[in-house]
Each structure stands twice: as C-alpha cells, then as structure tokens.
Image (tube, rainbow, N blue to C red):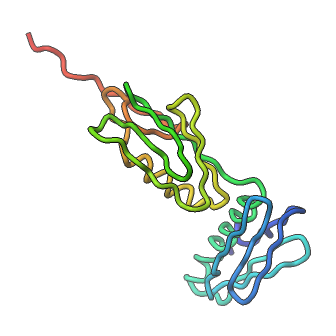
Amino acid sequence: MSRIGKKPVAIPDKVKVTVSGQKVVVEGPKGRLEHQAHPKTQVKVDGKQVVVTRVGEDRLAKGVYGLTRTLISNMVQGVSTGYERTVEINGVGFKAEVKGSVLNLALGFSHPVAFDLPKGITAEVDKLTKVTLRSADKQLLGTTVAKLRSLRPPEPYKGKGIKYAEEVIKRKEGKTGAG
C-alpha cells in the first residue's frame, strides 16, 4: 500500500475543496484549480481533510493512488500559498522586462524574444537579469519555466544563457593554444 496515498491532505482555513464524481475543485485566495481524478481512485472530503482511496488492487490502481493524493496536495498548497521559480539570465547585454503578460528578452540573438506568459502566471523582473515566476498551478509553472530556459540554455564555457537560480553549471576549460 502506498505510504503517500494513505496520508490525508489537510485543508487550510481559507481553502474550499469540492468533489463531484471524479472532478476535484480547489478554491482559495490565490485562485481556483480543477483536477479530473483517475477512475481507479475515489476522493472524499472528510471534515478538514481530503482522503484518497483506491478502487481495486491491480497495478494501475496502485500506481495512480499516491499520484492523485500528491496532485490534490499540490493544488491545496498552490491556492493557499502559491509556487514560485526564479531564473537568472547571464551574459553581456542579456536582460528581461515584463510588459503585461509578455516577457521581453534580449538573449544575444539578432532579434528580441517575446515570451508570452500563460494565463495564471505572473512574472517579476529584478535587476534586469533575475526573473521570478509565480503561479498557483505547480505543473503549469514548471513547464513554463522549462520553456523559458530552453530559449537559451546555459552553455558550459562562459555560463551564458538562462538558468534556474539554484542550478549549478559545470564549467569546462576552453581550448588552449598549441605551441
């Protein structure tokens, strides 16, 4: 039995969880998130906690049991406190600025890059090279940050590019002059 799936998800005071069939809706101060639970799981609200149980003992039911509980836990945390990821832009002349829902980037290309932020994500730029993205949806935030990093991944020689704030780039030594 899954150790993660057995744990109930605590519901904070300002968060409201409703379950109708397999549809789970979580509402809180940071927004509203929906999830369609797998048919092999059953989700119930029991007082101030959400309990996930599995339907059946087959391998698929056991696999999606803990996953469903974790997704609901992430939704509850997202609408109550939210998530944030920070990326750093390294390179001469590399910078970023936010205008509405568009992140304008200068990444050393011959043209500026306009990165459209999905609905539900906000960006904040600090010192032109540090971009903080915030959202209530953990999955949407992770995919957006990964797409942003893929515009100019960090290279190992000079470290230029977009990297996660906590990421460490292994640097390589360049060519040396043969004598």
Number of numbered tags placed on the structure image? 0
Q: Is residue 60 left or right of residue 175?
A: right
Position of residue 29 relative to residue 131, above or below, is below
Q: Quarter-wise, where is residue 174 in the image?
A: top left
- If the image is split into quadrants, where does the C terminus sit? top left
Q: In x, y percent, where is residue 80?
A: 78, 58
> Which of the pair 94/168 is nearer the observer?
94
Residue at position x 83%, y 79% in the image:
45
Q: Quarter-wise, where is residue 44 in the image?
A: bottom right
> Which of the pair 13/179 is nearer the observer?
13
Residue 149 can be seen in this image: yes
> Which of the pair 78/10 is nearer the observer?
78
Residue projecting furthest to the left: 179
Q: In x, y percent, where is residue 142?
A: 54, 55
Residue at position x 67%, y 66% in the image:
70
- If the image is split into quadrants, where does the N terminus sit? bottom right
